[in-house]
Image (cartoon, coloured by chain):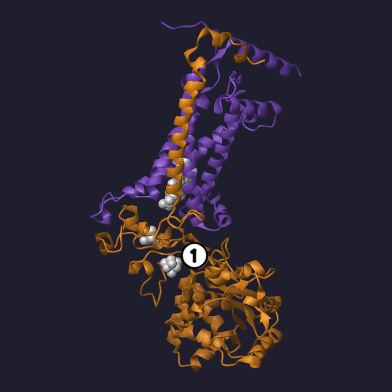
Amino acid sequence: MKSNEPSFYEEVRVNGISRSDFLKFCTTMAAFMGLEASGVGQIVKALESKPRLPVIWFHFQECTCCSESFIRASHPIVASIVLDKISLDYQETLMAASGVQAEEAYKTVMQKFPGEYIVMVEGSIPTENEAYCCIGGRSALQILEEAVANCKAVVAWGNCASAGCVQAARPNPTGAQPVHKVISGKPVINVQGCPPIADVMAGVVVHLLTFDRIPQLDELGRPKAFYSRRVHDTCYRRANFDAGLFVESFDDEGAKRGYCLYKMGCKGPVTYNSCGIIKWNDGISYPIQSGHPCIGCSEAGFWDNGPFYQHLPSIAGFGIETTADKIGLGLGIATAVGVAGHAIVTNVRKHKEITNTPETVAEPETKKV
Amino acid sequence: MRSRTNPMREVHVWELPVRLYHWVNALCITGLCITGYIIGNPPALMNGTEAYFNYWFGTIRFIHFLSAFLFFFNFLFRIYWGFAGNEFAKWTNFIPLKRSQWKEIMDVIKVDILQVTHKKIDSIGHNSLASVIYFITFLIFLLQCLTGFGMYSAMSNSFLPKLFAWIVPLLGGDIHARQLHHILMWAFILFAIVHVYLVFYHDYIERRGITSSMIGGWKFIEEDVYERHETESKEKAEK
Ligand code: HEM
Ligand code: SF4
Ligand code: SF4
């Protein structure tokens, strides 16, 4: 990268951010990323000295909630990460350019920074018929494949790009696929959530900037710093879970007392995210704190594991309210009836063996040769 | 008074380790099904109180995990005993690789399930159909341990559960592991109903003392069946 490009720090200073705010931001990011104290210095140094990270940001089949989340990050520096560092290159929602100029913008990035630029993707890619998502006459898949060929890494924003989200929910009419299923050979960072938490998104960008390599990922490609713990593990209602105190309906006494939302279908025990720690909207609250169960928005296929207000998913093909327990109980009763029937038949058909009349013993059939 | 003389021989079929395994297993499964069901559908026991007041749900989960470890090691032990144990405990009983096993499976279906023919099934240990069913239950044990420890790995740093962490992403997330784990509980319950019934059924029809055999290890076996078995074993040994 050319050193005559302004560094991130230089850019934010121009935008009127004080040094002390800048340092606060670096410290917060280091804390979110779970770095040691020395990590703060590394972040400060990186942001002060390194030029902008070349980024191409695509929107495929999505609702733009990831961008919305990102630009609503309350910290002004997070906003400037987006507005000043990414819109300059290519971001379909935020950039000023359109049409030919827009196309040129990202082609320029690809030519100027081969092997250095990051491709960020919002949205899933249709594979049933590529025509479901076209930009400038080319399909999402074609655009992505071309852009990824020379990139350094791919960031998949949100559940759509990481796992298909609502577009991939049954019956998935467009054959929507997440990024990691349609490309290969490049590291993909799945920043899960619908949308991901703004500070998590910022954390991932700062990590890429500071360390020049992708963060440590879990088995599902999610950065471990933000997705290694379940919402349940950091939930402030957890004491109520362990005490067996559950909200039974949204307007009951338990709801007022702040009991655990497990029986209201809370997916916290099966969802990996930072909601309980970083929270949303400048750390004001998160769904559970507002009395709503977690719906598992950072897990693959969460739309199909509903209904949201039920502990276990319904079983597909058995109707919306049918849980494993209902089917199990039905099968249990059927088995008991079957067993009872068999017992009755046995008494009839095996009468001789049971009463053991002498003929039975003598009967040649009873001896196997 | 009804009575009969039937030349029967007492045969020691189930060695002590097999019997111990059986009852530890039965106890664990009962405990795991009850605590597991409560974990999936917790009743509103203490509502109206505050959280610092009690820990009953945590205790239920603790019992579940404790029984889970016991269940797992007991299961491992049984696999070991499938190699070290006597001929009735050997792993070869459980996997129908031999023609004779398949023939016996067909016979058992005809004699005991459909009851269209009336002859005696010779096997001294498990009959071949029962063995296959037990093999399937072993696979279910394995799946239950995989999903259970897979979920457990999220809340533990110890070595053993971490060994199972890979199963969760393979299934597509914790919710699927949990769902599968919950569904499999019903497989255990269905098995238990049929299993207990069939033990009573065989005792009722064959009068070999199969129910008590899991306590003392001994079964009554008809003299001729026993002799046939002995000659077959000798022939095998000579080969
Ligand atoms: C006979 C065997 C077992 C049965 C019938 C059984 C049954 C269940 C059931 C029904 C649940 C509730 C699932 C739900 O609806 O949320 C559960 C939860 C669970 N089981 Fe098992 N289980 C068995 C063995 C095991 C084993 C071997 C382990 C291994 C550690 C295990 C670990 C767990 C864990 C970690 C949970 C989740 C509990 C929580 O986080 O609250 N289970 N089990
Ligand atoms: S509200 Fe949800 S995340 Fe919080 S303790 Fe209860 S089940 Fe866990
Ligand atoms: S609490 Fe659950 S559903 Fe809500 S934002 Fe967090 S992960 Fe998504």
- On screen, residue A349 versus residue B32, left or right, reads right
Name the residue furthest right: B239
Residue sitting nearer the eye, A208 or A157:
A157
In front of the other: A192 or A93:
A93
Q: Residue at x 57, y 54 (%)?
A: B166
Give the residue type that dot 1 points to. Answer: Trp
Query: Considering the image in quadrants, where does the C terminus of chain A appear?
Result: top right
Asked if A38 appears above or below B36 in the picture, the reply is below
What residue do we see at 61% from left, 87% from top? A89
Q: Position of residue A101 (x, y in %)?
A: 64, 93
Residue A64 visible somewhere in the drawing: yes
Q: In terms of image quadrants, where is residue A90?
A: bottom right
Chain B as rendered: colour: purple
On screen, residue A185 above or below B147: below
* Quarter-of-image position of residue A127: bottom right
- Name the residue carrying label 1: A303
Residue A43 at x, y percent in the picture: 53, 78
> A177 or A219: which is nearer to us?
A177
Local SS, label 1:
helix
| Quadrant observed for ligand 3 in the rendered image | bottom left
Q: Give residue A155's position: percent from left, percent from top.
A: 59, 74
Q: Which chain is orange?
A: A
Output the chain of dot 1. A
Q: Is residue B28 at least partly visible in the picture?
A: no
Quadrant of the image containing the N terminus of chain A: bottom right
Check disc 1: other Cα within 10 Å, few if <14, some if 14-19, many if 20+.
Answer: some
Q: Is residue B129 left or right of residue A318?
A: right
The number of discs equals 1
The residue under the point 40% across, 66% down is A276
